[in-house]
Amino acid sequence: MRFLCWLLLIGVGVAPVSLAAQDSTLTVGSKMFTENVILGWAAAYTLQDAGFDTRHREQLGGSRFLWDALVRGDIDVYPEYTGTLIEEILADTEVTPATLRDVLAERGVRMTAPLGFNNTYALGMREAHARKLGIETISDLRNHPDLRVGFSNEFMERSDGWPSLRQVYNLPFTAQGLDHDIAYRALTNDAIDVIDLYSTDAEIQRYDLRVLEDDRGHFPKYEAVLVYRADLEAEAPAAPAALARLEDRIPADTMRVLNARSAIQGEPEREVAAAFVQRALNIVSGDVQAPSRMDRVQTRTAEHLALVGVSLLFAIGFSIPLGIIAAKLRWVGPAVLIAVGVTYTVPALALLALMVPPLGVGYVPAVTALVVYSLLPIVWNTYTGLRDIPPPLMESATALGLSPWAKLWCVELPLAAGSILAGIKIAVVINVGTATLGALIGAGGYGQPILTGIRRADMGLILEGTVPAALLTVVLLALAEGVERALGRGPAVSDGA
């Protein structure tokens, strides 16, 4: 009994309360690049000015991820681009710019008029390198098959991205997938030669890049819009009107300036958006002042502890019984061990993505994925600890006339406690690190500053997430070590036997 109580205390002691959102709050989502985050904050501020409680879940992932979250009702609005809607989201439907609104309506989605700029895809090279090779158009790339090509991961898979571009231009390259912001740095460090761009990227001017002419007209228009759930018109009729205030208010030159203020000058996107809506729409937004670093760390620590603590608690609750079943029922044991082993081979990003369709975005799918990822070490160590108990001790317990349940509770689990705690320690390390990926689906935690730091090339923000994560790992391992020592000071197993 004491043993299991200690195990539960490990989870309970580090698990804050649920972070469930209030239904009355309007939720804005945004993708994982600077411009979309700025637009997300601008939309959030217009809704806030209209009197709505509003929150912004920034950096939620790619286009398909945000679209699914919108249709499912996890978010209410997010910035999108008409070309993406036509070529990617609705690729399996006959749709044109003229019929786009009607097709969206059939799916319970509305969109605003364009916000004022066309952020189309393009390919880019360093100006000096392109000039040296005489490359001005995408077609010119065919004459240089030795060029190293790296595209953003989403562009690699999109129907309007690399697969169709390679076919239209008959390009001879084998491209590699990279994060969009990392691709810029790889280009400037001469690690790759050609990358995909957004035409309003501030980095084009910053890094002196040449935008290659799309001489075969492959890329469609990508006019920025806000898409939102159709039922907002009935549930919150003032919301669509608030979002419409941004229509035709952001020309391309303005968007490039806003992007530069964040991506190059390092201003937080929320402050860039707040300054814009104040100047353009006379909206004085609340909660604009960025929190201090200490405040941010405290907030992210609470979020990370919630992810790690609750997932660890549930993992313990599932894993120990599974380990007992694997050790006791030999005809079931191999199947249990193989099953948990296979789940652990699923890449963490893929596991998170698999959790989103049934569970949505945010805290719940992140915790569920962490539970699945924590099963293997605890199940295996429980199994190993029970199977390695010396036979003479088990014979003594049988000779005392203990029932199978009493023998398991009073003898076997205490004897296997060291092995089980070792598995829990491994799960702690796995959880703290893997939980940083939860920021990709809006779960917060230390992954949020890490993702922002990668996007802005800000080592300070990256360290703001990685250093506390490392310290948290040390603290939780020390806690587990303290529990193990406490167990060692309890009544000797031989006395209980």
Image (cartoon, grey):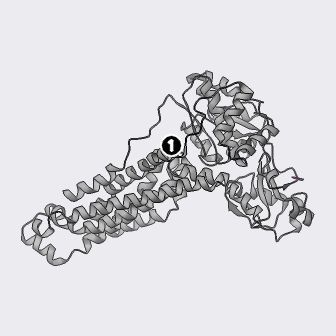
Task: Judge whether 453 appears above or below 192 on screen.
Answer: above
* Image point (84%, 55%), residue name: 208
- Which of the image's four quarters has the C terminus? bottom left
Give left or right: position of 284 versus 94.
left
Which residues, given as a range, are shown in magenta? 213-221
Q: Magenta part mainly helix, strand or loop?
A: loop
Residue 163 pos. (x, y %): 74, 58
- The verdict on residue 226 being magenta is no
Q: Which residue was labeled with disc 1?
A: 295
| Corner quadrant of residue 411 | bottom left
Q: Residue furthest right?
A: 134
Instruction: Rate crowding at label 1 as few (under 14), some (14 to 19) or many (20 or more) other CA atoms within 10 Å.
Output: few
Task: Judge whether 368 appears above or below 19 on screen.
Answer: below
Q: Nearer the viewer, residue 125 or 110?
A: 125
Give left or right: position of 42 versus 493.
right
Task: Judge whether 461 appears above or below 396 on screen.
Answer: above
Q: Nearer the viewer, residue 85 or 207?
A: 207
Residue 483 pos. (x, y %): 27, 60
- Which of the image's four quarters has the N terminus? bottom left
Residue 230 pos. (x, y %): 61, 29
Question: Is any atom of residue 329 visible in this view?
Answer: no
Give left or right: position of 8 versus 283.
left
For mark 1, give the secondary structure.
Answer: helix
* Image point (45%, 58%), residue name: 471
Question: Is any atom of residue 390 visible in this view?
Answer: yes
* Image point (48%, 44%), residue name: 299
| Corner quadrant of residue 479 | bottom left
User: Which amino acid does the dot numbered 1 rest on?
Assistant: Asp
Residue 142 pos. (x, y %): 87, 65
